Image (cartoon, grey):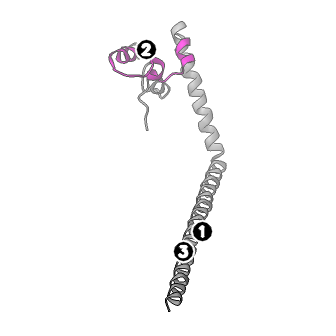
Amino acid sequence: MESNKFIDKCVDEKEDINNIDEYISKWKETETDMEIHEYLGMSENEYKSFRSNPNSLNDIIKVRRLLMESITTDIIENKEAYEESMRNEKEDFYNFIDRKSERIILKASRKAYKKVKDVVKRRKANKISKASRKKNRH
């Protein structure tokens, strides 16, 4: 999914950094709860840096590109490890669900057994009570 944030478009080389003023104007015209740094896709510190020194925008974008390259390289180099980790996490998740559902079923079975046991006890008590009443009548 492609981001529509100014900074992300600049990192992807789909937007010219000189167009930041247009984005700021759009933010002012838009009814949004977002702060300007969020609207642009920057952290608070990045935006503060940009406001105090507009030339820092180039550095912000360079740092983000380097970070993205580093992450991408790391993912490519460690693809098998990531995939294995994801398989393990998925397996752990399913095991957790299995254990949880077993506990829920066991708990429900215990409750149902207890209810059945109580009903049987009451019926026996009622039969004994009826039988003793019949004896007392005769």
Nearer the N terminus, badge 3 or badge 2? Answer: 2
Residue range highlighted in magenta: 22-49
Q: Position of residue 103 (x, y in %)?
A: 61, 62
Q: What residue is disc 2 on?
A: 18
> In this rendering, is residue 70 above or below 109?
above
Residue 72, located in which quarter of the rendered image? top right
Q: Which residue is denoted by mark 3 in the rendering?
A: 116
- Frontmost of labels 2 and 1 is 1
**Dot 1 surroundings within 10 Å: few (below 14), some, or many (20 or more)?**
few
- For disc 1, the marked residue is 110
Q: x and y percent of residue 138 in the render?
A: 50, 92
Find the residue positioned furthest to the top. Answer: 52
Which kind of residue does numbered mark 1 sit on? Arg
Q: Quick check: 91 above or below 125? A: above
Please name which of the two marks, 3 or 2, marks the residue nearer to the observer.
3
Residue nearest the observer in this picture, 95 or 20: 95
Gap in angstroms between the C-alphas marked 3 and 2: 76 Å
Q: Residue 55 appears at what percent x and percent y?
A: 53, 10
Q: Which residue is painted at 58% across and 75% down in the image?
A: 117
Q: Residues within 10 Å of mark 3 (few under 14, many from 20)?
A: few
| Residue in the image at 56% along x and 79% along y | 125
Closer to the camera: disc 3 or disc 1?
3
Q: CA distance from mark 2 to mark 1?
A: 69 Å
Task: Looking at the image, tell me whether mark 3 or mark 1 is earlier in sequence order.
Answer: 1
Residue displayed at 54% across by 18% down: 44
| Nearest the eye: 136 or 107 | 136
Q: Main secondary structure of the magenta part?
A: helix
Mark 3 to mark 1: distance in Å? Answer: 10 Å
Q: Identity of the amino acid at label 3?
A: Val
Kind of element beneath mark 1: helix
Asked if labels 1 and 2 touch by Cβ distance under 8 angstroms, the answer is no
